[in-house]
Amino acid sequence: MKNNRSPIRYSNALLLYGIENNLSEGILIEMQTILSTLGGSNSLRDFITNPVISKKNKEIAIFKIFNFKNKGSKGIVRLLIKNNRISLLAEVAHKFIELYNKFKGNKEAVITSATPLEEKIQLQIVKKVKESSFSGIKIINKIDETIGGGYILKIGDILFDESLSKKFEKLKRELTLNNYSK
């Protein structure tokens, strides 16, 4: 059973260390790399959680794969390995990113589109979002071909759905209601 408090404690300590030593931005970049790499590699996740593989071999492999430049990132990985908690690495990275963004007042804006958005369009969306009193926005572009076209913008709990699938759904509802009311 996973202990949800442990990743928070490790990431809190890492953030405090990063702030005190002016290393938090470097740690953030490395935690983002860890999260994306582990998210895309089942074999790496299986490797670091395998109890048969020695701590030393895990440390060597992780340090070769990620090539850490930051003392904070190196330290947290060593601590997780030492405490037999390396299986929490992705969760610690995720929580660190959350805490860092909260500390900096940043929010993530997830844009889902049918095709990759051009840089110019992303910049226009960021500009509009910042005008709407959201500062410190980080754009994450997700691709979902099922929306047909347009986009879905999610900032925290706020959702702006400008997708074709949503518009067709709304049109279908209106046509259905009009047919039954006559």
Image (spheres, grey):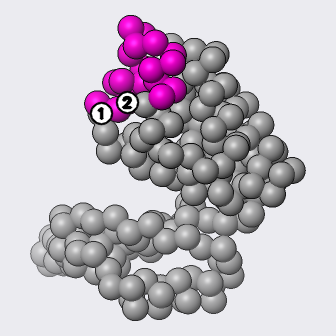
* Position above or below: 51 against 19: above
Q: Which residue is mark 1?
A: 42
Q: CA distance from mark 1 to mark 2?
A: 5 Å
Depth check, front residue: 27 or 96: 27
Direction from residue 42 to residue 137 in the image, left or right: right
Q: Residue 181 in the image: x percent, y percent?
A: 19, 74
Residue type highlighted by circle 1: Asn
| Residue segment shown in magenta | 43-60
Q: Amino acid at mark 2?
A: Arg
Residue at the (86%, 50%) spot, across then down: 20
Please state if 17 lies on the left or on the right of 127 as rendered.
Answer: right
In the displayed image of the protein, which residue is found farthest to the top?
52
- Viewer-proximal residue, 103 or 147? 103
Left or right of 52, for residue 10:
right
Residue 50 counted in the magenta span? yes
Closer-to-camera residue (123/173): 123
Label at residue 45: 2
Main SS category, magenta section:
helix
Q: Residue at x 83, y 52 (%)?
A: 21
Figure check: 10 above or below 104: above
